[in-house]
Image (cartoon, grey):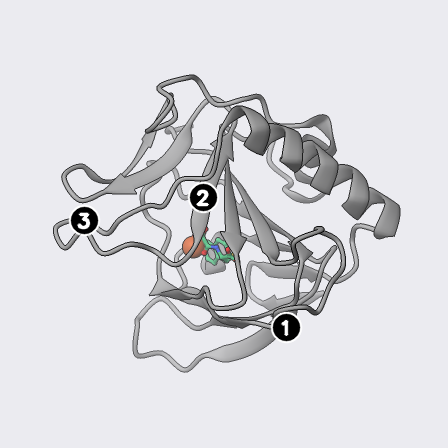
Amino acid sequence: MLLAPGLVYAPGFLDAAAQRDMAADIASVVAQAPWFVPRMPRTGRAFSVRMTNCGELGWVSDQAGGYRYQVAHPETGRPWPPIPASVLKVWDELSGHPRPPQACLVNFYDGAARMGAHQDRDEEDFSAPVVSISLGDTCVFRYGGERRRDPSKKLELVSGDVVVLGGASRLIFHGVDKVLGGSSRLAPGGGRINLTLRRVGRA
Ligand code: MD3
Ligand code: FE
């Protein structure tokens, strides 16, 4: 379902069994690469979202170094675990991109977490799409245009939904307005997990 040029929405792409399998795979990623709290460049203000990664590169941010991709976990210093096959399969089925993702950022939202409007521009290559997989609690996602002041729309993302952001939508402003805490039973402790799969380097 095409919501805007380059913005493909696949509601319910993962059935309940696939969601459970993927949640178990992500629990194993988190056991090897624990959640960390990213901080804003310069101000050092903490994100309300907790993060980890899998794949050859992971997105991190701290006060001194700012937003970047790096090969190691910022606290353990160990390489990120591999991207689970269940996750790579979604990229292969939906991205339309010939090469595999280099990074999978895993975001965890409790009922109070949100993500302000931003563009994803820490990658060198904007020709590859970003593939987003939602698991657990429902959220209200907001997306607009390439300028911050462009009008925006809301979209509820529920567990099992996948969004592909490519082409003319690759550089749109987007964020998470709120999470509907307790809306899913996927994770024992509740909360929402979002996976974003990306190419980072050029070509
Ligand atoms: C639109 N994550 O990690 S996923 C992020 O739900 C991020 O955790 C949100 O924004 C989340 O950067 C939104 C949907 C998404 C992901 C990447 C995009 C939308 C996008 C890249 C370009 C445009
Ligand atoms: Fe983003």
**Mark 1 close to ligand 1, CB under 8 Å:** no
- Nearer to me, 132 or 110: 110
Check disc 1 and give the amino acid type: Glu
Q: Cα distance, mark 1 to mark 3?
A: 29 Å
Q: Nearer the viewer, mark 2 or mark 1?
A: 2
Q: Residue furthest bottom?
A: 151
Mark 2 or 1 closer to N-term? 2
Mark 1 or 3 closer to N-term? 3
- Could you tell me if the residues under marks 2 and 1 are in contact, i.e. CB atoms within 8 Å? no
Q: Dot 1 corresponds to which residue?
A: 156
Q: What residue is drawn where x is 50% and y is 48%? A: 107
Where does residue 154 sit, x and y in percent of width and height? Answer: 55, 78
Mark 3 or 2 closer to N-term? 3
- Locate residue 195 relative to residue 22 in the image: left or right: left
Where does residue 111 sit, x and y in percent of width and height? Answer: 54, 67
Image disc number at residue 41: 3
- Could you tell me if the residues under marks 1 and 3 are in contact, i.e. CB atoms within 8 Å? no
On the question of residue 100 being in view, the answer is: no
What quarter of the picture does the C terminus occupy? top left
Image: 132 above or below 29: below
Q: Residue furthest top?
A: 78
- Locate residue 127 relative to residue 8 in the image: left or right: left
**Mark 3 close to ligand 1, CB under 8 Å:** no
Where does residue 167 sit, x and y in percent of width and height? Answer: 50, 53
Check disc 2 and give the amino acid type: Met
Q: Dot 2 corresponds to which residue?
A: 51
Where does residue 88 sit, x and y in percent of width and height? Answer: 67, 31
Image: 92 above or below 10: above
At mark 3, the secondary structure is loop
> Mark 2: few, some, or many residues within 10 Å (few <14, many ≥20)?
many
